[in-house]
Amino acid sequence: MFILFSTVYVACSDDPTEESNNDINVALEFQKYVDRFIEEGSSRGYEIDFSDTGLSIQFGSALPEDAAGVCSELGTGTSGSHEIEILKSYWEQLTDIQKERLIFHELGHCELSRPHDNSVFSNGDWKSIMRGSPLPPDKTPIVNYTGTRRDYYIDELFEPTTSAPSWLNLSVPYTDVSEDQKSMILSISDIEEFDELTTLTREVNFEIEMEMEVLSGLSFSGIYWAGPDIPNSLHLYVFDGKQIHIASGQQLYGIMHVFDYPSNIAFQKNKFTIRRVDDLYLLYFNEQFLYWLDYFPLRSAKIGSLNNEMVNDVRFHNVNVYTLD
Ligand SMILES: [Zn+2]
């Protein structure tokens, strides 16, 4: 399973049986992420060279509970601390960008001497991809390490004092798009579920709106866009009557973002809006700006309802799709 690497970073010992503490032993699956780490460091003025410390990245099975990967020591910077183990069953579920984040996190410990940092920005995004155990119980462990955000997170990885990114302040009022800019291309109302292929293309700006009324049951219910295949879709739903979850999208599995609402939002009509404006997705809840993420190209132009019908009784009203001028 593992491939002993004779790399450009280190000259291996002439005698392969000789014990050496600076061997490079990176399983093939992980090498491209190590290469990216070196490239990203280099473009920021850091020369990463594992020849002094060695580096081992292998699949391991005896990891602590809930750990996806583990670095043998937290950044002591000494040789022997550069031993990373990754849980294979977890790795195989990850997308490329998530694999990168995991390897960068572990190398953050080993190579950059970074401990965990669970700081959170005012918009709810993690401050660092070095977030880690013990994780706060009320927050999703997923880092929205995508698009524009990725550059910041790598800056921050190499330089923890990197100032807060300007995108934290990005907020676009709902009224920025006026009614006469909208041309309706699809409308559905008063139904228990929907699953429709729209005619939206990559070239157009658009808006998808849906009003949802939960009549009974407190589970998840909402809307997906560009799916339903995960991770190439965006899921927006109310959970347990008091949270809004943004899930998946842009090569991320899992819940990307959780918003808590102090008052119960169940059992009332709630309006969700997904608006694509050029390079951005802008998300609104009851016409209040919620969150943004980079536009990702469509794999599918499908919209559909999300609902735990075993538990909930839900009506969807005014499911409208518009192109925007
Ligand atoms: Zn960690």
Image: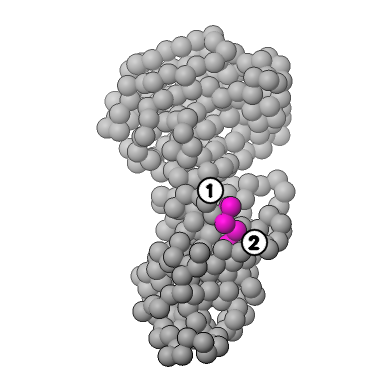
* In-front residue for pair 11/215: 11
Name the magenta segment's main secondary structure: helix
Q: Secondary structure at mark 1?
A: loop
Asked if disc 2 is less than 8 Å from ligand 1, the answer is no
Magenta residue check for 200: no
Numbered tag placed on residue 61 in the rendering: 2
Which contiguous range is marked in magenta?
Answer: 86-90
Q: Is 270 located above or below residue 37 in the figure?
A: above
Q: Going by the picture, which residue comes out furthest to the top?
A: 190
Residue at 68% across / 20% down in the picture?
310
Q: Is 5 located above or below residue 22 in the figure?
A: above
**Residue 160 relative to residue 264: left or right:** left
Q: Amino acid at mark 1?
A: Gln
Q: Is residue 315 visible?
A: yes
Residue at 41% across / 51% down in the picture?
148
Q: Where's residue 182, x and y in %?
A: 35, 20
Q: Where's residue 233, x and y in %?
A: 45, 35
Residue 108, quarter of the rendered image: bottom right
* In-front residue for pair 43/18: 18
Q: Label 2 neighbourhood size at 10 Å, few (<14), some (14-19), many (20+)?
A: few
Identify the mark nearer the N-term, 2 or 1: 2
Q: Is 1 located above or below residue 180 in the figure?
A: below
Tell us which disc is closer to us: 2 or 1.
Answer: 2
Magenta residue check for 87: yes
**Residue 135 relative to residue 209: left or right:** right
Cα separation, mark 2 vs mark 1, equals 16 Å
Residue at label 1?
93
Q: Amino acid at mark 2?
A: Ser
Residue at 68% across / 27% down in the picture?
219
